[in-house]
Amino acid sequence: MTDRDHSLRLRPAGIDTYSHPVVYMHVDCHVCQAEGFRALTRVRIDCGENWVIATLNVVTNGNWLSPDAAALSDAAWDALQPEEGARGRFSHPDPPAAASVIRAKVYGERLTEAQLRTIMDDALARRLSDLDLAAFVAACAGDGLDVGETIGLTRAMQAAGETLDWGGRPVLDKHCVGGLPGNRTTPIVVAIVAAARHLIPKTSSRAITSPAGTADTMEVMTPVALDIPAMRRVVESEGGCVVWGGGLRLSPVDDVLIRIERPLDFDSEGQLVASVLSKKAAAGAKRVVIDIPVGPTAKVRSQAAAAALSARLEAVAAAVGLELTIQISDGSQPVGQGIGPALEAMDVLRVLRCAPDAPADLRDRALTLAWLLLDMSGGSDTGPNRARELLDSGAAERRFMAICEAQGGFTEPQSAPHRMPVTAPRDGMITAIDNRRIARVAKLAGAPQRPRAGVLLRGRSGDQVHRGEPLFEIHAETPGELAYAQDYATAQPTLFRIEEPT
């Protein structure tokens, strides 16, 4: 057969499949029939010099797709970048080399760094199906990766993308393992450290399962989708940045794995460590502070779990050339007042502006992490007082605003138009706040997709409250989302634990 016989006209489907390439073909398509393609078949599509391997979905009725055309999901279209009227050539892809390696891991074999690199390379090239990737993630869940495999996975993930070189200068970085709503210390820490004239090129993620990631919060105030040359210009000019890492090709295979991990909700200590440290190494960092909040409803729930995670982080960091300081912090309740991109941005700005109503816990956490980084810098800017001076003098705020301007300009965060208080059902003392459930309320209100949505905390653990007083306020951009979040909140009697006076 000629290429023409195996080709179809390409058109965009206008469907977001979250970075997973999908192709849609009509059930009567001659290519499907000739090649024996069926639903969920992996199909290679070539268009000019570009190619992609996509998962086939078959259209069985309706008039939106004709048999002589193939529709591409957003991810597939972006990979091929076809010109108007272009045709794609369709074929069966070669079996991925990683498939047998994944099968070995499923049956309990220990993988070498070379085998892990094969998996990462095939995953990044989209040669693996979601079923392949899910099998790998499941095999690594829990204690599925030992320390040696974690080191190999970290190196393989870093090698799959670019690594930045800052000319031998000491580069600082920080990371929080997550699970604590509102813990938006990163913009404050970056501002303080950059104001002390140290390099801190911070790449951050968007929310995976939380109401806001650092990139979501920063994007309320300034552009974060910078490429590497733009990021370099900001850092060379201002000493630091806070940008979205997804577009920089720094450990890019992590985003492929996250797409699988998110719906599975599997917790793998080894993959968490590899994800964090591969990105730090790829960003060119040499000295890193890791914040591990510990609490009954945080991601890390016990001191024993924190100790195990710390030991693995330290072992892997040493193997990949990172100097690490680990801070074990209180993860018993949310940090600050706001949960959601705009509300968290307002908290950040209040701390940087030294406002009287700035959340003290967010300020204190940021100062501690900034002090630890300054202490690692080896210069004269050490000690907790120096971090506090840079914040209280306004130097950190000025540097933060300069960073925002360099990234594309500053925008003041705005409040949501619809709000609803949730009040205390009885008199008493707040003795606990469920981190996961309060985060769920914020997500049901629309966060992070709707930046102004979220939760504004009015009460904290240890506060005395009276019946009818507000515990928190739901913020939403639409009445429907407000009602949805309120229904969930009122159905959660243990969201705020209130012990009645004895």
Image (spheres, rainbow, N blue to C red):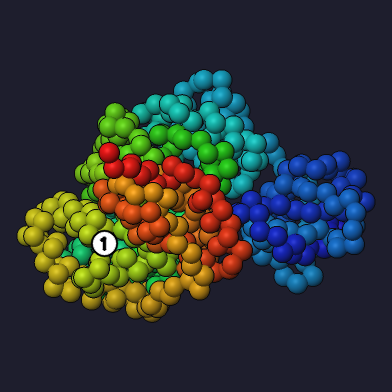
The answer to which of 37 and 464 lies nearer the viewer is 464
Q: Is residue 316 above or below residue 87?
A: above
Q: Crowding at label 1, few (<14), some or many (≥20) Cα neighbours within 10 Å?
A: some
Reading the image, the residue beneath label 1 is: 359
In the visual, does 497 lie left or right of 239? right
Q: Is residue 192 above or below residue 43?
A: below
Residue at the spot 79% in from the left edge and 70% down from the top edge? 85
Q: What is the residue that sits farthest to the front in this orientation?
A: 502
Whole-percent x, y for residue 407 in the image: 38, 74
Whole-percent x, y for residue 477 in the image: 54, 69
- Helix, strand or loop for disc 1: loop
Residue at the spot 43% in from the left edge and 46% down from the top edge? 495
Residue 342, by quadrant, is bottom left
**Could you tell me if residue 220 is visible in this image?**
yes
Residue at the spot 49% in from the left edge and 30% down from the top edge? 140
Whole-percent x, y for residue 113 in the image: 43, 33
Q: Is residue 484 above or below residue 302?
A: below
Check disc 1 and give the amino acid type: Pro
